[in-house]
Amino acid sequence: MLQSSQAVLAAAASAAFVWFLDPPWAVVAVRLGQTRRPTMPWWLVVTAGFCGWIFLAALWGAPKALLSLASIGVAFGIAVRWKKSRHKARTRAAREACMEVVEVLASDLRAGVLPTTTLARLADEFDYVRDVYEAHRVGADVATEWHRASTQPGCESLRWVASAWAVAHESGAPLALVLETVAADIERELELVSEIESAVAPARSTAVLMAVLPLFALGMGSGMGAAPVHVITETLWGALAVSIGSILASLGVVWVDKIADHAERA
């Protein structure tokens, strides 16, 4: 009964802390574009972490409180890394979609198909082309809509389409040849990104492997009868060593990711 009450208190405290950091009305305001999401100052995060450790230490003891905070930090790092990988995947998919859009436009214009027909077909598959199609249908500025579409992550290459469209509209120059060149440039850019990602992938994998390697050491210690789990969960020095090691391993993974991201951007 006591353990159940402690678990309920811990869950309630965690929910209250999350509510304080990011209340629902703040999320709604950010989604509506009324304000920017505030950033928490470092001293408040450190103070909240120390208060949380005091609370957990009173409930479960100092070793388990340290392990709990270390687990939260590691879980946060994993969540950030997973979110970044999903963002990269979406950006790459957007680049491939832009290449497909430009290739279809170029081939149709080369074949003599009206731009309205091609844009209408592409608008059914790609949301950002729908605004371009509506602007072309009503006689508005199509280049502006292409520029607006290029602000989306992974669609930066569409600004070339916007510039080519504006020049073709003002001078009457053929647009198909320019779009074919743009599509070829996008394809070369995708190939370069793939080569760079393949080059830095071993470094990322090595960092993750080095971070999870101590888990195998725990298994080996248990097999040898050393009882490492008891040392970690019941002694302060064991919990402190594991907590510091976990945080340092997570920071190492983040550091390697930063280096790899810098190489990819360069």
Image (cartoon, grey):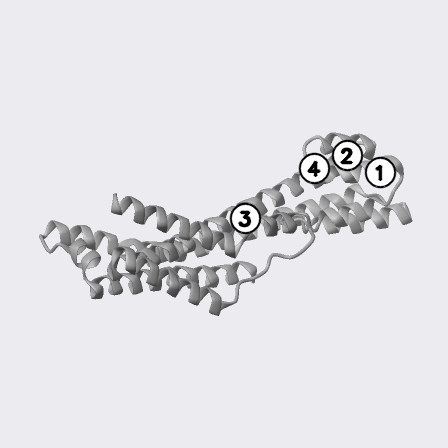
Q: Which residue lies under the disc numbered 4?
A: 127
The residue type indicated by label 1 comes to His
Residue 182, horizontal then vertical, whole percent: 71, 48
Q: Which residue lies under the disc numbered 2?
A: 119
How far, Cα to Cα, is label 3 from label 1? Answer: 31 Å
Using the rendered image of the protein, determine whether residue 80 is visible from the camera's viewpoint. no
Residue 197, horizontal then vertical, whole percent: 49, 53
Using the rendered image of the protein, determine whether residue 94 is visible from the camera's viewpoint. yes
- Residue at 80% x, 30% y is 117
The residue type indicated by label 3 comes to His
- Residue at 28% x, 55% y is 59
Residue 266 falls in image quadrant: bottom right
The residue type indicated by label 2 comes to Leu
Q: Which residue lies furthest to the left in this view?
A: 225
Contact (CB < 8 A) between labels 1 and 4?
no
Tell me the mark number nearer the camera, choosing from 2 and 3: 3
Contact (CB < 8 A) between labels 1 and 2?
yes
How far, Cα to Cα, is label 2 from label 3? Answer: 27 Å
Q: Which residue lies under the disc numbered 1?
A: 136
User: Does residue 35 appear to the left or right of 242 in the view shown?
Assistant: right
